[in-house]
Amino acid sequence: MPFLNRDYTRASLALALPVMITQVGQVSVNLFDNIIVGKLLGAQALASVSLGNAVFFSIFVFALGFSFAIPPLVSEAHSQRKHKIIDSVFRHGFVINMGIGIILMLLLFLAMPLLYHMDQPKEIIPDTVAFLSIMTVSILPFMAFQTLREVSEGLSYTIGVTKATIIANVINVALNYVFIKGMFGLPAMGVQGSALATLIARIFMVVFLYYVLVKEEKTRRYIKDFSLKVAEFSKEMFRKMLKIGFPTALQMFFEVTAFAGAAFICGLVSARDIASHQIALSMASFTFNLCIGFSVASTVLIGRKLGERDFVGLQRIGINNIKIVFLFMLFCGLVFIFGRHILPTFFTRAEDVDVIQLAAKLLIIAALFQLSDGIQVVALGSLRGIQDVKIPSIITFVAYWLIAIPLGYFLCVPFKMGAFGMWIGLGLGLTVSALLLVRRFMKLTQRKINSAQPI
């Protein structure tokens, strides 16, 4: 028997590759922000942006989690040709996403003054607040984009999202240089310029994607039927979406805040440690976000099989995608190891030797937990496809906040291992998460297979 199933692999890649390109574009927004800020403004500015992004994504990812309730419901309804249900999911998802976005935007503005009281390097806080103030406003256009994206991906149309992301990324990179350096008569804006470029790029993304979906045959009817009439809303649909969205939001919140917490812990040691942490995290996040393509493919294909009541095929797709991501992350880990002395130089100036050397050590650990990172995100997507989200959120809490962060803190601060110790803790947390999530997927899908067999 071949290691990979050809049909399942082909179907997964057809969905995953455009999503991977989309994720490259979205991650590249932050990746290029870090590179450009580090190159133009130095390690201190990079540390400011790192801290700002850590705080922003700790809150922002909670909003993203709610939007992930859309694809499994759309995919299941699409396999059953229930167009009215897709209209309802779209409508309710938009209201939930925008409502959560507004709440979290206000929360971020209220929480910013706390940064001055969290034992971070004092020299980076003013730039962090300036950067974060503009980034916070970008939540609303991005949540509108995310709603359109998740409906589109649930319908197995992914290329439109890819186009919007690529073009927006080009705009972001160009505007970064213009605003940071002060070109074409504009004043030099420093880290604020980087945040403003991201805001403008995100506004473009939602406008462009809306235009694409109106033109596309697969999605046109749902865009044109979209309505916010009060009579078309139901408590039952809100309850159903929140039942999936809220645990998913918690799961993402636990994971991302663990890495944000790691940034704060590294900041307790030195600006060098937090800058090195950000470089390694940028690289690890890049490969992780590529794996989201396989996670989305798992959610959509498994959601489709769930609608068709094909539980054997459902399990096989999940297993096959775990194998695919294992091979992919094995390759990425080798790139990290052999390129560990070169990759950090893209993020900071040549004279920041200490930052580069520490980042190279962190990339070795990142390479080792790449396998666990990829497997756990695909397992989460597979479980989301069968609409199992509550227990996975508990698993991620245990793995990150009861294992990774406590262990990382003790190795980083009391044991004086710095960022290197923090990353040992993160790696162990990812491994525990991957093992428990795969075990749950196999257990639940086997239960469905057994219950469907005639007695």
Image: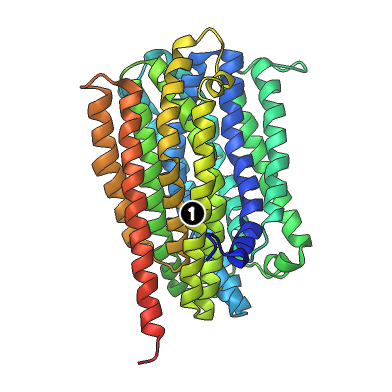
Circle 1 packing at 10 Å, graded few (<14), some (14-19), many (20+), is: some
- Compare residues 276 and 251 and report the one nearer the observer: 276
Residue sticking out furthest to the top:
351
Residue 194 seen in this snapshot: yes
Residue 142 position in % (x across, y down): 58, 46
**Residue 104 visible in the shown view:** no
Kindly identify the residue that appears in the image at 36 percent across and 44 percent down: 430
Work out which residue is located at the far front of the displayed protein and give it. Answer: 1
Q: Which residue is mark 1?
A: 99
Q: Choose between 329 and 165: the one closer to the eye.
A: 329
From the viewer's perspective, tell me whether residue 297 is left or right of residue 109.
right
Percent x, y of residue 275: 45, 20
Residue found 56% across the figure and 18% down from its top: 345
Q: Nearer the viewer, residue 315 or 273?
A: 315
Residue 236 lies in quadrant: bottom left
Q: Is residue 209 above or below residue 41?
A: below
Q: Is residue 138 above or below residue 143?
A: above
**Identity, as a three-letter code, of the amino acid under mark 1:** Gly
Is 340 situated left or right of 149 in this image? Answer: left
Q: Residue at x 43, y 57 (%)?
A: 379
Q: Position of residue 153 (x, y in %)?
A: 61, 60
Q: Is residue 187 left or right of residue 341?
A: right
| Colouring rule applied to residues | rainbow
SS label for mark 1: helix
Q: How far across and how far down the image is residue 259, in percent?
A: 38, 36
Tell me the quarter of the image containing the C terminus.
bottom left
